[in-house]
Amino acid sequence: SPDTEVVQIQASDRDQHHLLTYSLYSSIDPNSMHLFRIHPTLGTIYTAQRLDHEACAQHVLTVIVKDQ
């Protein structure tokens, strides 16, 4: 279902006052980019819409984390 939590990404920074921003950067199948969303400050990945296991059994996403 849409808005289902899939996984939470965690990153760390050695700065005392760090603000990390998470974003979906790329995927092996470009269609996967439309099927997921990521919370920009928590790093939690959610489904953006209902997934069809028969259409695609696996989604490989690349997440980028930036230090503000």
Image: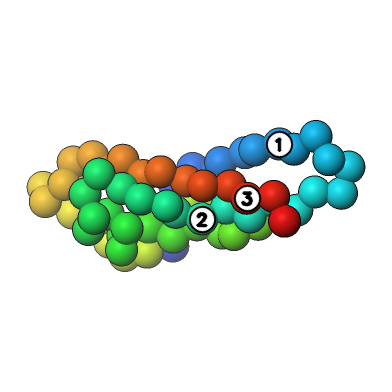
Looking at the image, the residue that sits furthest to the right is: 16
Say few, some or many: other residues with alpha carbon within 10 Å of mark 1 (under 14 / 14 to 19 / 20 or more): few
Residue beneath label 2, please? 23
Labelled pair 2, 3 in contact (Cβ < 8 Å): yes
Task: Give the residue at x 23% y 55%.
Answer: 30
Say few, some or many: other residues with alpha carbon within 10 Å of mark 3 (under 14 / 14 to 19 / 20 or more): few
Mark nearer the N terminus (1 vs 3): 1
The correct choice, above or below, for 18 with respect to 58 in the image is below
Residue beneath label 1, please? 12
Measured in 3D between alpha carbons, the distance from the residue under mark 1 to the one under mark 2, in whole angstroms, is: 15 Å
Looking at the image, the residue that sits furthest to the left is: 54
Mark nearer the N terminus (2 vs 3): 2
Query: As rendered, which of 5 and 56 lies closer to the eye?
Result: 56
Which quadrant of the view contains residue 12? top right
Coordinates of residue 10 in the picture (x, y in percent): 62, 38
Q: Secondary structure at mark 1?
A: loop
Query: As rendered, which of 2 and 19 lies closer to the eye?
Result: 19
Task: Give the residue at x 69% y 50%.
Answer: 67
Kindly identify the amino acid type of the residue bearing the numbered disc 2.
Answer: Ser
Task: Give the residue at x 58% y 47%.
Answer: 65
Measured in 3D between alpha carbons, the distance from the residue under mark 1 to the one under mark 3, in whole angstroms, is: 10 Å
Position of 11 with respect to 53 (left or right) is right
Q: Secondary structure at mark 2?
A: strand
Coordinates of residue 55 in the picture (x, y in percent): 11, 51
Measured in 3D between alpha carbons, the distance from the residue under mark 2 to the one under mark 3, in whole angstroms, is: 9 Å
Q: Secondary structure at mark 3?
A: strand
**Nearer the viewer's eye, disc 2 or disc 3?**
3
Task: Give the residue at x 64% y 38%.
Answer: 11
Say few, some or many: other residues with alpha carbon within 10 Å of mark 2 (under 14 / 14 to 19 / 20 or more): some
Mark nearer the N terminus (1 vs 2): 1
Res. 52 in view:
yes
Residue beneath label 3, please? 66
